[in-house]
Amino acid sequence: MRILITNDDSISSQVLLPLVRWAKKLGEVVVAVPKYEQSGKSHGIEIHKSFEVQQVEFEPGVTAYTVDSTPADCVRVLVLGLHQKFDLVISGINKGLNIGYDIVYSGTAGAAFEAAGLGMNALAISTDPADFTPALENLDRVYDYIVSNGLLEKNQIYNINIPLEAGDIRITRQGGPYYSDDFSFENLTCSPMGKCVYEESHNYELDTDATLHGYISITPLCADRTNLDVFRSLRK
């Protein structure tokens, strides 16, 4: 199996090397990550200017590249530019949970959506920024769950969130808002100031409630944004 690892936290992510070393147990690993942090870039790509792609020394036996663009472009460059093929794309481990509506903004998820659009299975993995250790310690358990339940045969993209106190694994669906912003204004500039807007609902089907109550959340995602219920009703 050939595995592409990317992220939105750049080549400087402290969890990138441990993740790569873990993934080497599964097959051949290639790394393509942003040169600089690209958090919040969603599924954005660069179409207006050229950008640097550089092969770098990283880990013995692993070919690695830095891409001076977004996580989605990291996937595009390797597949469309260098014509490489992969069986699985792993995006992460993100420094911060990607739950609820925040998935829309996530560069980590954006890379997974791009991978699926190019015909590959993808896992977007995130955790609490306070400590990567629990996420790393649970990778085997999460991957065994995915394989034993044939999840990648059922769907191409899964969004995975591993909390600090990682308990049981739950299949979840996207919850509501988790973080938002206030803005401060000074002269002609404004600065976003993040704030938590999460509202407890005790519904552990939601990735927000499940993750924030200690469950490992696995959410099947899809790139098709069609509202099928409305589509079917309008077709009638």
Image (spheres, helix red, strand yellow):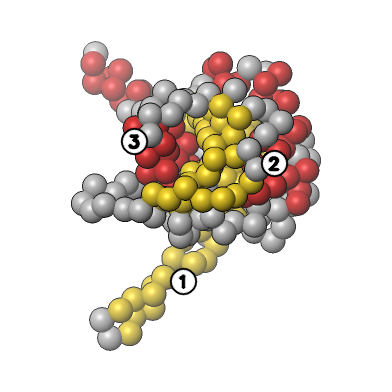
Q: Which residue is mark 3?
A: 81
Residue at screen point 69% across, 41% down: 21
Q: Residues within 10 Å of mark 1 (few under 14, many from 20)?
A: few
Q: Amino acid at mark 3?
A: Gly
Q: Secondary structure at mark 2?
A: helix
Q: Which residue is mark 2?
A: 21
Quick check: 32 above or below 218? below
Q: Residues within 10 Å of mark 2 (few under 14, many from 20)?
A: some
Q: Nearer the viewer, mark 1 or mark 2?
A: 2
Mark toward the start of the polypeptide (1 vs 2): 2
Quick check: 49 above or below 226? below
Q: Residues within 10 Å of mark 3 (few under 14, many from 20)?
A: few
Quick check: 215 above or below 49? above
Q: Secondary structure at mark 1?
A: strand
Locate residue 211 relative to residue 193 in the image: left or right: right
Rounded to the nearest angstrom, the CA distance separating label 1 from label 2 is: 36 Å
